[in-house]
Image: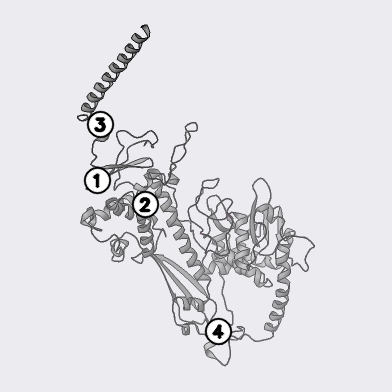
Amino acid sequence: MIRQLRKNYDRGIRLFSAFIMTLLGICLGAYSRFYVSEYDTPKQETVRAINNTYYKATASQASFERPESTPSDSITAEEEFIPSLTKLNMAFLYSHQGEGNTDTGQVPYAAAESYAAQALTLLSKKDANWLASIYEIAEMSPEEVAVRFQLPRENLLGTYNPSDPLHNPDDSSSWVIHRWENVTTSFINEQRQELSSISNKKDILSMANTFLYYKDPKDFESFCEYIQYLWDISHSISCQISSVYYCGGELDCQTATPSQAADAAQLTDQEISDITESGSEIVEEEEIKEEIGPGVELIKASLSEAAKEEETAAEAESVQQPACPGHVDLYITAMVRGESEADGSLFSIDSMGGASDETIGWNGWDEKAKEETRNLAQMNWAESFQLPSASDYVQSSLTKDEISAYLSLLPDSISQERTALIEYALYSVGRLPYYWGGKPSTAGYMGNEFGSVVEPDEEGRILKGLDCSGWISWLYWSALGQRLEKEGTAGLAGCGIEISKEELQPGDILLRLDEEPHGAVFLAWAPDGKTIVIHETSGSNNNVIVSATDNDWTSCRRLLSN
């Protein structure tokens, strides 16, 4: 009886519970038809996270702003950023999120990782390769330049030169002049005015900032496409070959101006005169010392050439020198267009951004757009946008007369290899920025991208270049076609053979192996006992220079015997 009562009680409890749950479900269902969650509210615009900024796109205008709330796994912007015509907008956008470190105070994004920094690096590489192409044109033979620039070969014909093996006395069409007497390079703008700065990177980035502000200020792909287009149309190279002229002297007639070389090395005329006289006191090496090192191969390879040169020189002395076979000069004009009002300015030749587009509110390069662009280009970007100051690294190169004056310091008996080495070194003065730890990738200029923006070295230098030992290695590789096996200062101390200071000849290398190691190429002796050297140096120059240095070198090495 009791068991039956319990069963009926349990059944009643279950039925009551079911009734209550059904009633609650009906009430909730009815309420849900009238409740609208804020997450279900239709959006009139979309918000997309772009690293540390948020881009809100509408049909009429583009602006950057922080949303009222963000998911927990999103990036929180440090401060609100709105694109502007007075800011380099790509300096506030990044390709990836940085880790950040609150303990060290490191910020999640470094300025060097911004899109603007990447664009600056891209243009700096184009600048570097362009300069390299100009330097390589200067190293071409007259015939090679004539073919490349489609200039008449007839303009290179002089008179018969018996010392030129390519000349046929019976065929006047073979009397081509195979070497430039002078090479002059001019950097000008669209108004044919000499440039104080040979890079227009800021002009190009400023133009892109103005144009893309209207089109899409976050579109880095379009930004890169546009800046490369602007760079391509703003740079050009043209060459002109002079008429053949005759100096009235004898074969291989050349004049030197020692006083001009003195200015470059900060020496007096009397010192240069003394140096010229002291050249005959240099001791010549008659045999190779028994020592193992990478430079020994260069020494051995040059022995046969030395014998041939002595034989050729002896024959030449017995033959009366004919009249001057003629000279020819090369003029290289490198044009970099900018933001002037001239007809050929970058504004006027821009077909990609020059056309107006009413759908985005772009009126082309009208006066307002030009003014906005120029104002941005004139700003200090290092202070305003934390961008590296990638100024021109090219300094004052030596003139033809200065190089001839330095070459006049070489002994008459010097070999052709040493002359070529010194001449190549002199032409590199002012062309290669100093970069600690910098080593060459290839011989010559093309392919090394000297002057392009790279990661800072230990002193904060950001232009790709060479250090002192890297420059020596590059010099031998470029001038003689053979790369040294060692490229560090300590490694060079094991190259070639050790010689005394009294045995130094132009082209030998000098090393200082102490707490501040350094390397240089010997050129000549100064009357006060100092050494005149060519070297890649840091400090205020940060480039290749010619200078007179104290005779505190700890090692002298010879890589060439003759």
Please give the residue where the numbered disc 2 appears in the rendered image. Answer: 220
Q: Nearer the viewer, mark 1 or mark 3?
A: 3
Q: Secondary structure at mark 2?
A: helix
Q: Quadrant of the C terminus?
A: bottom right
- Within 10 Å of disc 4 (Cα), the crowding (few <14, some 14-19, many 20+) is many
- Horizontal relation, residue 152 to residue 179: left or right: left
Q: Nearer the viewer, residue 1 or 300?
A: 1
The quadrant where residue 208 appears:
bottom left
Please give the residue where the numbered disc 4 appears in the rendered image. Answer: 325
Does the segment drawn in magenta span residue 251? no
Please give the residue where the numbered disc 3 appears in the rendered image. Answer: 37
Q: Earlier in the sequence, mark 1 or mark 2?
A: 1
Segment tinted magenta in the rendering: 436-452
The reply to whether residue 246 is visible in this rendering is: yes
Q: Nearer the viewer, residue 403 or 508?
A: 508
The image's mark for residue 58 is 1
Q: Earlier in the sequence, mark 4 or mark 2?
A: 2
- Within 10 Å of disc 3 (Cα), the crowding (few <14, some 14-19, many 20+) is few
Q: Amino acid at mark 4?
A: Pro
